Amino acid sequence: MTRTNGRQQVALVLLCAAVFLDSMDLSLMGVALPAIGRDLSLPESTLQWLMSGYAVAYGGFLLLGGRIADLFGRRRVFLLSLAVFAAASLVGGLLSAGWPLVATRVIKGVAAALTAPAALSLITTTFAEGPQRNRALGVYSLAGATGYTAGLIASGLLTEISWRLVFFLPVPIALPVLAAAPLVLPRGVRPPGAREGFDVAGAAAVTGGVLLLVFALTEKSWPAGVVAVLLLGAFVVIERRRRAPLVPLEVFRSGTVGAANLAALAWACATIGWQFVAVLYLQQVLGYTALATGLGIVPMGLAIVIAANVAGRLISRWGLGRVAAAGMLVQGAGILLFLRAGASGDYVTMLLPALVVHGIGNGLSFPSLNIAAVAGLPDERQGLASGLVTSAVQIGAGIGVAVLAAMMTLGGSTPAGYRIAFLTAGCFSLLGALVAAFGLRPRRPAPVPAPIA
């Protein structure tokens, strides 16, 4: 069995710290928004963009980020984008005006869109495919999955002191990574075909299409949605005709890549959309404070950590499809357990079991999908594949939040409305489980005809 050396282990820690930051920043704003609005007298429309600006930029530029990592060097892109992320965090904590704050969030989203695929491709090219890479990706997925939950917890704790600490938090985490990464991360080589050119038209079409799609769902803008569909359709046409496309469409037919991305989209719709609604439920229906909300989510974070730590071993034994499908079914069961809670749901008997069950399923499914999304691809496609799956998650997050928020309003933001949203999230989990069960099964080779004597 191939064992990892000390340099590989340190590199893994640094790369996981970066993706932890990217995921954490998705949720850091959630609990802090009311305090920011009160302190700076900001309207709700501006507060909304403090959250959606980061997510839209992150999801919209991810495909471009994977290609840039392949073209200009994964280590170089990783270090530069992480430095920009830290600088924008520092500046954001010092500002006292709404739209400049939004601008720093958008800049951080673009930086995260470069950091995430560069980090994942550095991992997949540093660790050999098989158990070694599965373990590394399990740790990586743990960092990403817990980052979002950690952001909710940290936001609740820090907002009690000052909302500015929420902006400053990434800085002391990013600086040690920036100092140590040049010493341990491999320089790598330019992948074959990297000099073939840059698909500007394809990049513009897909980035604009994704940005407008998330904007349309967030703002309920049908014109933006129509333009988004047209741009995404144009992207497919462009990629079919390009000699060196941004996304070679045949990659979706490689192994489990296509099914993994579709399942990851459903996973994000379910889990991130559900977490958005669940936080609102805890504060607006049950009357939890920001601090109580953060502390109440801790058991879910612990369950994610435990499940993600054993996911690699389960995958090696049972296979990607079975573990991913089982994880999403368990995750969905945790979501549906929230249906029992009403306007005065007891934490210990109703909420705690739902949070723990959801965390277990989350920790099992997310690593499985990350591994399936890059399995069997050559090194020169790793940056592309990692960008695809991370983009699927971010787009799913935007879709899930928008759809579940709409479902919630059907009941007038009453307990009945929250139940509709929880049921919808459970359906997303079931859809993802079905895709994983049937789409991530190992493909049997075609039978070889016996030679004729």
Image (cartoon, rainbow, N blue to C red):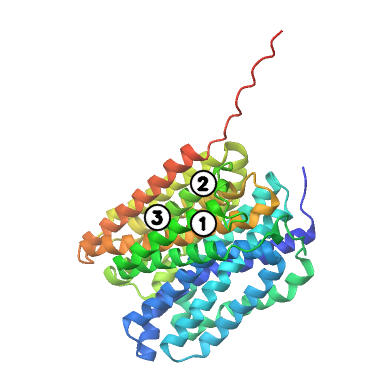
The image quadrant where one finds the N terminus is top right
The amino acid type, in three-letter code, at marker 3 is Ala
Residue located 34% across and 72% down the image: 288
Query: Which mark sits nearer the N-terminus, 3 or 1?
Result: 1
**Residue 415 location, quadrant:** bottom left
Q: Residues within 10 Å of mark 1 (few under 14, many from 20)?
A: some
Query: Which mark sits nearer the N-terminus, 1 or 2?
Result: 1
Residue 404 image position (x, y, % from top left): 32, 60
Residue 416 image position (x, y, % from top left): 21, 59
Q: CA distance from mark 2 to mark 3?
A: 19 Å
Residue located 46% across and 87% down the image: 100
Q: Which residue is mark 3?
A: 270
Q: Which residue is mark 1?
A: 238
The amino acid type, in three-letter code, at marker 1 is Ile
Q: Which residue is mark 2?
A: 258
Front position in the image: 264 or 243: 243
Residue located 53% across and 67% down the image: 61
